[in-house]
Image: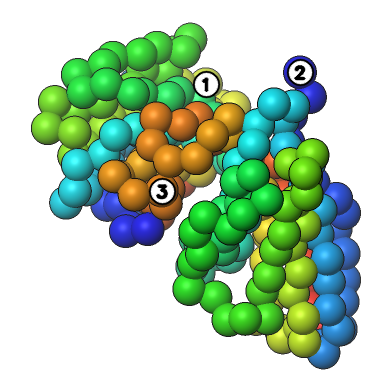
Amino acid sequence: KAGVTQTPRYLIKTRGQQVTLSCSPISGHRSVSWYQQTPGQGLQFLFEYFSETQRNKGNFPGRFSGRQFSNSRSEMNVSTLELGDSALYLCASSPHTGGGNTIYFGEGSWLTVV
Amino acid sequence: GQQLNQSPQSMFIQEGEDVSMNCTSSSIFNTWLWYKQDPGEGPVLLIALYKAGELTSNGRLTAQFGITRKDSFLNISASIPSDVGIYFCAGHPNDYKLSFGAGTTVTVRA
């Protein structure tokens, strides 16, 4: 069974640009969550999607958005990039939402903003 | 989600040693998950725990879901060099958000 797939793996953007990251969950998983990981802040929850609906949202500005498609694939978008957005963005999938869930991570997308 | 208290923050291991780390929360958790992350990679799920008191092994790794449902432990027996990395605990309280510990960095002692 293929794992969680994230693309692109690495990317460099300049301040003010926008970026779209993609995530394909494990087959059969309907929940996709996004996290930002930086050395100073650890793993910070961005949002969770389940059945194309946003179920939860973390404390990030509106520049961070996401969506989920009917095939459970998800994208996240960051607009008007800032230097502080440089981070590893991790996607995680799980069969359903809520407790009792086993969550699997992708390898992440490394974003560098210059 | 709320932050879990994970300790120790870092540890040095010598090959062959047993090591342990733990996570505590002020709230009751329904699920505890333990991950290992190597540099530049995503976290890899090691062990998942779903019931209070549950003790689960995965090779040299053993984890337990605390009876109070507010803590969990991960033990690594007979450590080897490839055990270095960052170990994270994560858990589901009663809401939907997964909470993470700050991680335990395991390094080989020179």
Residue A18: x percent and y percent? 84, 78
Query: Which of the pair A82/A55 is nearer the observer?
Result: A55
Query: Which of the pair B46/A75 is nearer the observer?
Result: A75
Residue B43 horizontal side relative to residue A23, left or right? left
Q: Amino acid at mark 3?
A: Tyr
Query: Which of the pair B93/B89 is nearer the observer?
Result: B93
Subunit under mark 2 = A
Residue that carries the numbered disc 1 in the rendered image:
B80
Q: Residue at x 68, y 81 (%)?
A: A63
Q: Is residue A106 visible?
A: yes
User: Which-is-in-front pick, marks 1 and 3?
Assistant: 3
C-alpha separation, residue under disc 3 versus residue under disc 2? 26 Å
User: Which-is-in-front pick, marks 1 and 2?
Assistant: 2
User: Which-is-in-front pick, marks 3 and 2?
Assistant: 3
Q: Label 3's element?
A: loop
Q: Quadrant of the N terminus of chain B?
A: bottom left
Residue that carries the numbered disc 2 in the rendered image:
A1
C-alpha separation, residue under disc 1 versus residue under disc 2? 28 Å
Subunit under mark 1 = B
Q: Residue at x 54, y 34 (%)?
A: A96
In the picture as drawn, the residue positioned furthest to the left comes out as B68
Question: Which of the 4 quarters of the picture holds residue A30?
Answer: top right
Residue B44: x percent and y percent? 59, 33
Residue B41: x percent and y percent? 69, 44
Residue A74 horizontal side relative to residue B103, left or right? right
Q: Residue at x 26, y 39 (%)?
A: B29
Q: Are marks 1 and 3 on the same chain?
A: yes
Residue that carries the numbered disc 3 in the rendered image:
B96
**Where A81 sits versus A40, above or below?**
below
Among numbered discs 1 and 3, the one appearing first in the sequence: 1
